[in-house]
Amino acid sequence: MSIEVSAAPPQTGDAAASQRFSPIAYAALSLLLAWHTVAMVLAALPESRISDALRTVFSPYITLLRLDNDWGFFAPNVGSGYQFRYIVKDAAGAEHTFTPADTLSRFSPASIWFRDRYRAVMAAPETFAKALGDSLCRQHAKLHPVSITLIEIEQDDFWPEDKLAGKSPLDPEFITTTPFGSTQCPAT
């Protein structure tokens, strides 16, 4: 049994040149690439005199490839924030406010689970608020809790001028506080 291996001779001259694109094809592909790149950038630009003038030329191409969507390239509309807090009222009548997000580490995988847990409770308090309240009563047993009040904090509009004035997005003037559940803790 013998195996023959033959290699094709290297192509030189006219044979190698026939496998490459012609200069006209290179020029056409280069123009198409430049045209497409300009169209993508133009579609994302905010309106101005220059971009509006160029859009009249590029509009059919931009529409054909559905590049005219509002993608928010330069300034996406980020929704206002929200935060979960709760108040533990102890046997002496003192109120202790807790913000769980302040104690969660972004580097801990458990933080994702806890954030999702609080989101679920805020989204469906009729289903989850009682269970969370009971859990928080046990967690804060050393405070001798009488009740737990669950609160959703929603951030209102906060502008750059507010930041420059030294204010925080979670200052009382920029938030709406909504209690959404209350649990009476068993006597300890």
Image (cartoon, grey):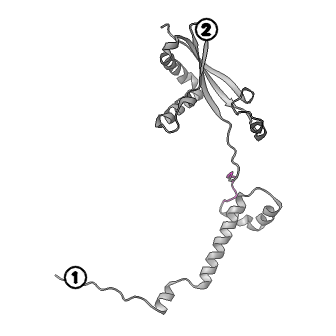
- The picture quadrant where one finds residue 94 is top right
Residue 67 belongs to magenta span: yes
Residue 75 is situated, as x and y percent measured from the top left of the image, at 71, 49
Give the magenta part as a residue range. 66-72
Q: Give the crowd class for mark 2: few <14, some 14-19, many >=20 residues within 10 Å.
A: few
Horizontal arrangement in the rendering, residue 158 relative to residue 148 (left or right): right
176 vs 94: above or below: below
Q: Look at the numbered disc 2 and give the secondary structure of its residue.
A: loop
Viewer-side label of 2, 1: 2
The amino acid pointed to by label 1 is: Ile
Q: Nearer the viewer, residue 58 or 132?
A: 132
Horizontal arrangement in the rendering, residue 100 relative to residue 54 (left or right): left
- The picture quadrant where one finds residue 177 is top right
User: In the rendered view of the protein, which quadrant contains the N terminus?
Assistant: bottom left
Horizontal arrangement in the rendering, residue 77 relative to residue 15 (left or right): right
The amino acid pointed to by label 2 is: Gly
Q: Residue at x 66, y 27 (%)?
A: 153
166 vs 93: above or below: below
Residue 127 belongs to magenta span: no
The residue wearing badge 2 is 93
Q: Give the crowd class for mark 1: few <14, some 14-19, many >=20 residues within 10 Å.
A: few
Label whose residue precedes the other's in the sequence (2 or 1):
1
By secondary structure, the bulk of the magenta-drawn segment is best described as loop
Q: From mark 2 to mark 1, how far is it between C-alphas?
A: 93 Å
Q: Nearer the viewer, residue 75 or 67?
A: 75
Q: Residue at x 69, y 51 (%)?
A: 72
Q: Residue at x 71, y 60 (%)?
A: 43
Q: Can residue 63 be seen from the camera position used here?
A: no
Residue 95 is situated, as x and y percent measured from the top left of the image, at 61, 14
Residue 17 is situated, as x and y percent measured from the top left of the image, at 51, 88
The residue wearing badge 1 is 3
* Count of marks placed on residues: 2
